[in-house]
Amino acid sequence: MAAVAKSVGFMAQLTNSVKRFVFRASGFNQMGLYHDDCLYETSDVKEALRRIPQNIQDDRNFRMQRALHLSLTKSILPKDQWIPFEE
């Protein structure tokens, strides 16, 4: 039973490591974007966006405009402004 528990712990740690790698490789955090900012706007996503408070919508729009500007200027944010994995 202890071997199974160790195996489950190892798999959780491996999964977390893979998630961190994919997060860093995507580069969205370097532009100040959250994962949810990059979703395709399907009907479900549009409905979710309609339901969120206005201040969160404004923050999202600001992040997307800033990312567009950074993309056009081919630059990234200073490292202290990157979105951390934990958020």
Image (cartoon, rainbow, N blue to C red):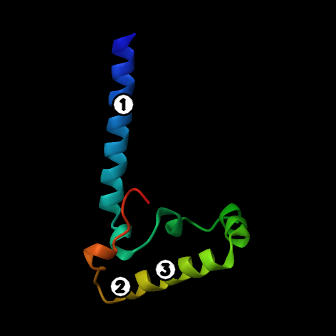
Residue at (73, 68) in percent of width and height: 51
Residue closer to the observer: 31 or 85: 85
- Please tell me which of labels 2 and 3 falls first in the chain: 3
Residue at (37, 68) in percent of width and height: 29
Residue at (41, 81) in percent of width and height: 67
Sort mark 1 into few (<14), some (14-19) or many (20+) by Cα contacts within 10 Å: few
- The secondary structure type at the circle numbered 1 is helix
Sort mark 2 into few (<14), some (14-19) or many (20+) by Cα contacts within 10 Å: some
Q: Is residue 5 above or below residue 64?
A: above
Quadrant housing the C terminus: bottom left
Q: Which mark is residue 1?
A: none
Expressed as whole percent of the image width and height from the top left, the position of residue 6 reads 33, 21
Q: Amino acid at mark 2?
A: Leu
Per the image, the residue denoted by label 3 is 64
3D distance between C-alphas at marks 3 and 1: 34 Å
Expressed as whole percent of the image width and height from the top left, the position of residue 17 reads 31, 44
Expressed as whole percent of the image width and height from the top left, the position of residue 11 reads 36, 31
